[in-house]
Image (cartoon, rainbow, N blue to C red):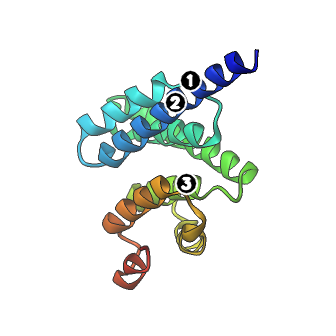
C-alpha cells in the first residue's frame, strides 16, 4: 500500500512540475509577441492545479488576455479580475517569491495608465532578499527574469549568482 501511495505521489509531483515548467517557459515568451501571449494563455488555461504559483500564472494569463483581446470593453475586466486574483494569492502566500516575480513582471510590463504598478519596488526588494533561499530551478528562472527586467539595476542583476 505504501508503495502504491509513493508511486501516485511521485506521478502527481512530476505532472505538477511539468505544468509549472511549461507555464514558466511560455510565460517568459508571453511578452515578446501576441502569439507568445496567446500561447501562454492557452497553456495556463490547460492547468488545473490549485497550487498557488500555478494559480498566479493563471491570474497573469487573465491580465494578458487584455493585451490580445479584440473586444476593447473587456480589457478592463480582464485586468481587474487577474490583478485581484494575483493580489489575493500574494496576500495568502506572502512569503512566496515566485508569486512576487509574477506580479513584478506584470506590473513592469502593463501600461502605466492602467494604474497597476504600485508594488514593483516592494517586490524587487523581496525577490533580492529571498533569492538565496530558493531552489536551483527557481533561482535560474529569477536570474532570467532579472536580466530582462526594466527595474533591476546592473548591480542587482549581478548580485543574483
For the question of whether residue 23 can be seen, the reply is yes
Does 141 sit above or below residue 63?
Answer: below
Q: How much space separates mark 3 and mark 1, taking CA atoms?
A: 23 Å
**Answer yes or no: do the residues labelled 1 and 2 have beta carbons within 8 Å?**
yes
**Answer yes or no: do the residues labelled 2 and 3 have beta carbons within 8 Å?**
no
* Residue 155: x %, y % from top left: 38, 85
User: Front-most of 89 and 84?
Assistant: 89
Q: Is residue 73 left or right of residue 30?
A: right
Residue with the mark numbered 3: 98
Query: In this view, which residue lies farthest toward the bottom?
Result: 155
- Identify the residue shown where x is 38% and y is 57%: 109
Q: How many other residues sit within 10 Å of disc 2, few (<14), some (14-19) or many (≥20)?
A: few
User: Front-most of 116 and 119?
Assistant: 119
Dot 2: what SS?
A: helix
User: Front-most of 98 and 11?
Assistant: 11
Q: Is residue 75 left or right of residue 54?
A: left
Badge number at residue 14: 2
Q: How many other residues sit within 10 Å of disc 1, few (<14), some (14-19) or many (≥20)?
A: few
Amino acid at each position: 500500500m505504501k508503495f502504491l501511495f509513493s508511486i501516485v505521489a511521485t506521478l502527481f509531483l512530476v505532472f505538477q512540475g511539468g505544468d509549472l515548467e511549461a507555464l514558466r517557459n511560455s510565460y517568459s515568451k508571453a511578452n515578446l509577441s501576441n502569439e507568445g501571449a496567446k500561447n501562454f494563455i492557452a497553456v495556463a488555461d490547460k492547468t488545473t492545479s490549485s497550487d498557488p504559483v500555478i494559480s498566479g500564472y493563471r491570474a497573469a494569463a487573465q491580465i494578458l488576455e487584455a493585451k490580445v483581446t479584440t473586444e476593447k470593453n473587456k480589457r478592463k475586466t480582464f485586468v481587474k479580475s487577474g490583478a485581484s486574483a494575483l493580489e489575493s494569492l500574494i496576500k495568502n502566500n506572502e512569503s512566496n517569491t515566485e508569486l512576487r516575480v509574477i506580479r513584478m513582471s506584470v506590473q513592469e510590463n502593463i501600461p502605466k495608465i492602467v494604474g497597476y504598478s504600485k508594488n514593483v519596488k516592494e517586490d524587487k526588494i523581496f525577490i533580492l532578499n529571498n533569492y538565496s533561499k530558493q531552489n536551483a530551478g527557481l533561482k535560474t528562472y529569477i536570474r532570467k527574469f532579472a536580466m530582462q527586467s526594466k527595474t533591476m539595476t546592473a548591480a542587482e542583476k549581478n548580485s543574483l549568482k
